[in-house]
Image (cartoon, grey):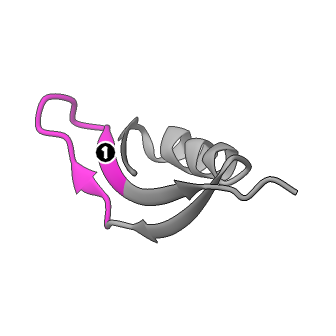
Amino acid sequence: MRIRIDGTRAEIIDALFRLRLHFTVQAVSRAYPDRAHPHHWRVYLTTRPRERR
């Protein structure tokens, strides 16, 4: 599954920590600047659901 995260750097880092609780993150792209919002970035993740124990 691919997930796109938009926000400030702090918001993106927080979202990554929270997503890792529920998904196995296989890849994270570099941060791309958001043209519409000068202090926002976007990151793309490749994930899969965590295995239930």
List x then y, in percent, for residue 19: 62, 46
Q: Position of residue 23 (x, y in %)?
A: 62, 53
Q: Is residue 14 magenta?
A: no
For image coordinates 31% across by 38% down, the residue present is 40
Q: Residue at x 58, y 42 (%)?
A: 15
Residue in the foreground of this view, choosing between 10 and 29: 29
Q: Residue furthest left?
A: 35
Vertical arrangement, residue 27 with respect to residue 43, above or below = below
Residue 38's x, y, as percent?
A: 22, 36
Numbered-mark total: 1
Q: Main secondary structure of the magenta part?
A: loop
Horizontal and vertical percent position of residue 1:
40, 51
Seen from the viewer's position, the closer of residues 9 and 22 is 22
- Magenta segment range? 30-44
Q: Quadrant of residue 14?
A: top right
Q: Secondary structure at mark 1?
A: strand
Question: How would you rate the neighbour count of disc 1 (Cα within 10 Å): few for under 14, some for 14-19, many for 20 or more?
Answer: many
Residue closest to the far right: 53
Circle 1: residue type: Trp
Q: Which residue is mark 1?
A: 41
* Horizontal relation, residue 45 to residue 38: left or right: right
Q: Quadrant of the C terminus?
A: bottom right
Taking the spot 54% from the left edge, 44% from the top edge, the residue there is 10
Q: Is residue 37 magenta?
A: yes
